[in-house]
Amino acid sequence: MGQGKIICPGCGAALSEKDMPFCPYCGRELIDLSRERTDEKISTVKRVHAETKAVPKKIAVYVTITFLILFLLFGLFIFLDGPDRIREAKGQADMDRLSSAMKKAYEKEDWEQLEEYLIYECEEYIGAPDYFCYRTAWFLHTYPPLFDEAYQTHDTDEMLEIYALFGEDYNMRGDDLFYRIYVTQEEIEEALWEEVEREKEILLEEGLEDEMYKLRF
């Protein structure tokens, strides 16, 4: 009998080990072959079961290690002032957004939109570092024509009010704290100074020196 063969105890036929647990000739159960295959199947099932039971343990180890790494990273994040940095980055992003909106309106000479930002939404926009820069630009667009109109009609009260507005705006630049918080543009600053001097000269010509002194800005 060659290797890999088995003799059927019922009819004596030589069978291959790959045959079914029953003899194809007489139908007798091949006990030894059936047991061999059964043991093989049981062994396979046990091995798979052992491997399956090990999977949750491996997952638990991986999860534990992952959480440990995340915990250490979070601790490092807190230690390095992560929340403060996030708040600072968000604050800077908000300021950049506000400045960009004002700059866009200014460059497009959309004075109505700029007025909306500077006057009606000032509580939000005043935190932007270039708020007073663009507010001065809006002043320079809006009030000189009104000053000249008041001059033509001899409305000295209106002239003095507008002059006071520009004077107070200009005098803010005299405080060092202003430049620590806000930024300016040279051309706007120069235009502001020229307008203050122009209105001052007109008011002096009108003999309003005493009224100008009372403004005390």
Image (cartoon, rainbow, N blue to C red):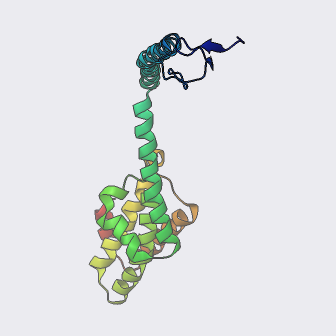
Quadrant position of the N terminus in the picture: top right
Using the image, determine if residue 58 lies above or below residue 209: above
Q: Residue at x 51, y 57 (%)?
A: 184
Q: Position of residue 75 (x, y in %)?
A: 42, 20
Q: Position of residue 214 (x, y in %)?
A: 28, 64
Q: Residue at x 33, y 77 (%)?
A: 159
Residue sticking out furthest to the front: 11
Q: Position of residue 84 (x, y in %)?
A: 41, 33
Q: Nearer the viewer, residue 164 or 134?
A: 134
Q: Nearer the viewer, residue 86 or 43?
A: 43
Q: Quadrant of residue 17?
A: top right
Q: Position of residue 50 (x, y in %)?
A: 45, 13
Using the image, determine if residue 141 lies above or below residue 36: below
Quadrant position of the C terminus in the picture: bottom left
Q: Nearer the viewer, residue 75 or 174?
A: 75
Please say whether residue 125 is visible from this viewpoint: yes
Using the image, determine if residue 7 lies above or below residue 165: above
